[in-house]
Amino acid sequence: MRNSKIFWLLSLVLVLSAFLAACGGGDDTDTSTETTDGTEGTEPAGDLDSEQVLNLMESAEIPTMDISLAEDAVAFNIFNNVNEGLFRLNQENIAEPALAEGEPEVSEDGLTYTFKLRDSNWSDGTPVTANDFVYSWQRSIDPATGSPYGAYMMAGSIVNATEIAAGDMEPTELGVTAVDDNTLEVQLERPVPYFMSLMSFPTFYPQNEAFVTEKGDAYASNSENLIFNGPFTLTDWDGTGLTWKMQKNPEYWDAETVQLETINVDVVKEPATAVNLYNSGEKDRAGLSGEFAMQYANDENLVTELEPTVFYFKLNQERNGEENALKNVNIRQAIAKGFNKQDLVDVVLANGSLPANFLVPTEFAFDESNADFREVNGDLIEFNAEEAAELFATGMEELGVEEVTLEILGGDTETAKNMDAYLKEQLETNLEGLTINLKAVPFGVRLELDEAQDYDIQTAGWGPDYQDPMTFIDLFVTGSAQNKMSYSNPEYDALVESAKGELATDPAARWEAMAQAEKILLEDDAAIAPIYQRGAMALQQPYVNGIIKHPFGGDFSYKWAYISGKE
Amino acid sequence: MAKYIGKRLIYMVITLALIATFTFFLMKVLPGSPVASADKLSPEQRAVVEARYGLNDPLPVQYFNYMFGLVQGDLGISINQFKGAEVTDVILSRMGPSAQIGFQGMVLGTVLGILLGMIAALRQNTWVDYTSTFVAIVGISIPSFVFASLLQYWFGLKWDLFPVALWKDGFMSSVLPSVALAMFPLATAARFIRTEMIEVLGSDYITLAKAKGASGSEIAFKHAFRNALIPLVTVLGPMAVSILTGSLVVEQIFAIPGIGEQFVKSIIVSDFSIIMGTTIFFSVFLILIILLVDILYGVIDPRIRLSGGKS
């Protein structure tokens, strides 16, 4: 029996070493080619393959394909490819007319939009009419529907939306009317300068009343019970499964632009499996997370995409009703300047993220001459260890304390924990007298602690809901849902108010006001401390061309994608 | 026997009611809202969405509504994973693949384990024995998801013998996940059978059988094996549990549309009705396995039979 014990031990060592060897066996190539993201021109560059099939993966199931009920990235991405609204984001991510025939007629006060609809059909051959929009919007704002995005997107913009959502008015009183089959009129409560891009968001897509009513409860429960008006149709989706297809929609008004015949999608939740399927040639594109991003950092088929999501510290000035050290502006500025963001994105995150010295992300919002909003303010609050140390010393003097202890509340994912550990180390090193305690909790718990204002510093992130700086700029006005940190500056509030109100019809002045508000928020007040703008990495086969990544709404468009050079 | 099973079934219903109650309240303590975009919506907007699923009712009302539905076989409607879909439909559509790989894994593991254990016992302290022990120790000590990853990498990607993942090629798709799940039952069965066989082979009645001139295979199968099976039946229950918990990750690794990975996700996204539905489903399954094991005892070993040998 003694022998067998030694044998067991030996076997264990053997197995473990075999396992470790298998894990370490990366296939990194040494070629470090610079790859740009897939924004090639409109016209397919090379020869098209005879088989136009794209094989993709998603990381989650489709929770619902009901346009009024959807609230997740997977569904929004599919909507963007199987349905269409008045406008669509083009290859340069500018909203351009889709179902709308040309630009709408806008009244002088900016409150009435009249859209002419182009002739287009649902996938069953019946025409898309103005009433389909009216029905869809009314359905989404009706409290009986329980739409998560209906009121969120419409309240405060479209006439009576707030009152209808609260149950004080009938859905039919919503400010949208079908003048005739091809004319849609929308009444706004206030001018909305980004209204066209809003019209590309799925919540504003049309729904076919006859179809929805006929299907009743079965509507959108699987691909048989759906109707489409976009570049593709959804097929082979059983409602709960891990697989579906998108097929070219012959009824689509711009079908001649669409090259792909079929897109096969499978849900693969395990990142390692996704990479294996990509390497086996079964899938054409695989998102890379965490360790895989590092492992494939030099792969020639690596694609890096910048996302319009910004992460920042929320600096809570009043925890549980009591003022804390963060009430002092010097302390806040010291923290905002007190950590090296470049090292964070290069070493800790290593996924193509950018250091953020701003709140409104880069490559997200553009003015009429297509200039990035970022060009107005440039970098605002940058890392500077010396200045930070001085500010911190001044702050402590003003407070009359020798040391400050603060808590950083953050997420419990591996990435979040690594980042918070790094930030703690940076802040404690650069700001003498500061002690940081880390608290990592799941997302739901973080929301509850935020709601209760029970934290000192919180790492939070925000992605846009429409393509305009305002989706970020107004986050922290006095009393807003995101401002659970007792920040209040009348000057900042007034700038946001004017950009939403009287400046709405004067794009240049409005742009300037929002830039000013951002400056006050970040530099003067250091109400929040920006950390980074998220990047994403994926492996994509070189024969895949023309997948367009969007900054909001659906993540991707496959309308212009094509396969060339696979055969 | 029928009376015994009837009594057990009544206990089973009570157990289930307790499990359902306990899970229900435990689940309600979970932080987080089932509304996916909760961070963006105002409290009023969130209330509108939650009202749709009766989440704003007082807790006791929600509890009685749920239990009332449960008695009628209504498991409710999914809140956010498959909005509006009947939980019963979700479970039914996801059950097949789980059952297939679970059953194949269990059968493969147990049969191979028994064979391995018997050979090891009959060839005690030879290289055959050592190899079998090696396999057993590997199977016990390395979790199924590690096996799953290794199988996928080597048999799927490198050697291209089976599909890397996905549930598209019928039986071929089920091979690697079944093998990954089989490792624990295989190891457990091999260890138990080996130990028991060695003990039984050393006992007096085997010596007597030998003296009477019974052949080697007759002794091994007719006398030793049957007695060695009893302790194995005892661990069938825990083995079924290991298949269940193993399937949670194995299904995810091989991207199989099974019920295990559904269970895990429902907890993360607070889809209350799916959490309840899958918990109850798993509980029923486990309780039935335990009942089956108790009945099997009697079949294998007459001494344990409950109501006299005649029934």
Image: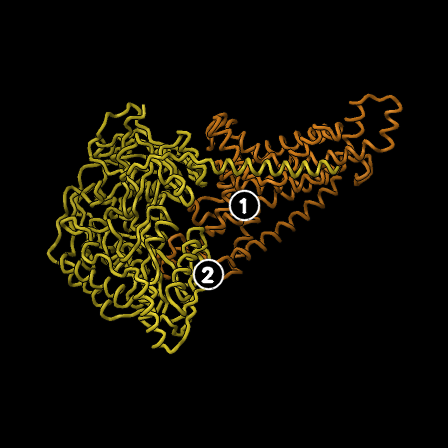
- Would residue B180 appear left or right of A190 to someone viewing this image? right
Label 1 resides on the chain identified as: B
Colour yellow, chain: A
Which residue is more in the foreground, A219 or B288? B288
Q: How crowded is mark 1: few (under 14 residues within 10 Å), some or many (20 or more)?
A: many
Q: Which residue is drawn at 34% across and 70% down?
A: A392
Quadrant hosting residue B188: top right
Task: Residue A452: tell me if it is visible.
Answer: no
Task: Residue A557: tell me if it is visible.
Answer: yes
Give the CA distance from mark 1 to mark 2.
32 Å
Label 2 resides on the chain identified as: A
Report the amino acid beneath label 2: Lys
What is the secondary structure assignment of the residue under circle 2?
A: strand
- Would residue B289 appear left or right of A466 to someone viewing this image? right
Q: From the image, state whether disc 1 or disc 2 is nearer to you.
A: 2
Q: How crowded is mark 2: few (under 14 residues within 10 Å), some or many (20 or more)?
A: some
Which residue is more in the foreground, A169 or A61? A61
Quadrant hosting residue A38: top left
Q: Where residue A166 sits in the image (x, y, percent)?
A: 32, 61
A191 lies above or below A282: below
Q: In this figure, which residue is indicated by the disc labeled 1?
A: B278
Give the quarter of the figure containing the N terminus of chain B.
Answer: top right
Name the outermost residue toward the front.
A386
Name the outermost residue toward the left.
A108
Give the quarter of the figure containing the C terminus of chain B.
Answer: top right
Colour orange, chain: B
Which residue is more in the foreground, A357 or A57? A357
Report the amino acid beneath label 1: Thr
Q: In this figure, which residue is indicated by the disc labeled 2?
A: A439
